[in-house]
Image (tube, rainbow, N blue to C red):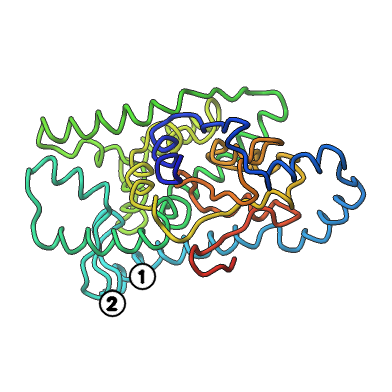
Amino acid sequence: MSYVTESFRQLFGSEPRRPDKSEITPEAQAVHIFKKQHPFDVTAFEEARQAHAGDAKKWRNRRWTTLIIVNLLFVVSYYFDVQLLEGALTASRFMGFHMADLNSALQVTLAFKHMVLNLVIGTATVFVLWLLLGGRTFCSWVCPYHLLSEWAEKVHLYFADKGWIKDHSFNRKIRSAFYLIFALLALISGYTVFETISVTGIVSRALIYGPGVAMIWVGLVLLFEIFYSRRAWCRYVCPIGITYGVVGAISPLRVKYVLKDCHHEGDCRKVCLVPHVLDMTVKGKAAHTEVDVSADCTRCGMCVDICPTDSLRFEIKGLGKHL
């Protein structure tokens, strides 16, 4: 099954397809057999973990810095009227050039049944940008709610570790259902219903123009994530991830998994927002010696940061080099 097909399956809620034994390449089979016959040296692994400690937050720090700078550019442009990055994440102008959030553009088009020229230009620009960078990169590197949810997740995990709460998961196909519901509501009602409740848009506008009553909704969503279901909005509701994931399915920027270097300790899946995309890291499941992580990956880099043996790494396809 092709990378794009499998990416689409995962984006719309299907579980990762597990390859039959006949689909596992001889090279991958040889690595699996070698690992089974030669267990990793625990001492050597701990030494590798300690040596990697200095890079344990490298990509997280880069991502947080980028996300904060992008959103601060909106704030600075508005307050000082420098016309650098005007508007908000849903629709903006960068140095006079129009940019439009792809999901917002879709909602507007469905609601009003046509696209104005500026929306066409803005959509095309953003489409090309995330086609190159990987669609769901928007979620972890730009979306301000993602950062709030990431911090809320730390509280959730602390409470869960203390035994005060229990995490509740849902079927991931619910997000596809919401995607269809929001699209149909826009088409039938002529109103962009999702934009009214989109925590991404609400937080973005609150940062720029000041908080309003809508921030109460954001607070309720965060409380739900802290006390009931970890990262529920991003995992089970928000259609933005699907829209960008579809666009980024053929992006050259991906996270690559290298089988021979993996110790299968599972730390990468524990920190991942979308752990199903790392199913190949489970012992014996990789069909190839090198596997690209699907387009449902947000490219947040947390798995890359936590992996002590660099079996997960950013790579630009076609250039043969990792970042």
Q: Residue at x 67, y 36 (%)?
A: 282
Badge number at residue 250: none
Residue 36 location, quadrant: top right
Q: Position of residue 135 (x, y in %)?
A: 39, 53
Q: Amino acid at mark 1?
A: Val
Residue 275 location, quadrant: top right
Q: Earlier in the sequence, mark 2 or mark 1?
A: 1
Please name whichever residue, 40 or 231, is drawn nearer the observer in this view of the structure. Answer: 40
Q: Residue at x 55, y 62 (%)?
A: 315
* In the depicted structure, whether residue 294 falls above or below residue 194: below
* In the depicted structure, whether residue 280 falls above or below residue 114: above
* Residue that sits furthest to the right in the current view: 43
SS for dot 1: helix
Q: How many marks?
A: 2
Q: Residue at x 24, y 67 (%)?
A: 93
Q: Position of residue 102 (x, y in %)?
A: 27, 51
State left or right for residue 155 relative to residue 309: left
Badge number at residue 76: 1
State left or right for residue 261 relative to residue 25: right
Circle 2 residue: 82
Kindly check if marks 2 and 1 are in contact, taking CB atoms under 8 A apart as contact. yes
Mark 1: few, some, or many residues within 10 Å (few <14, many ≥20)? some
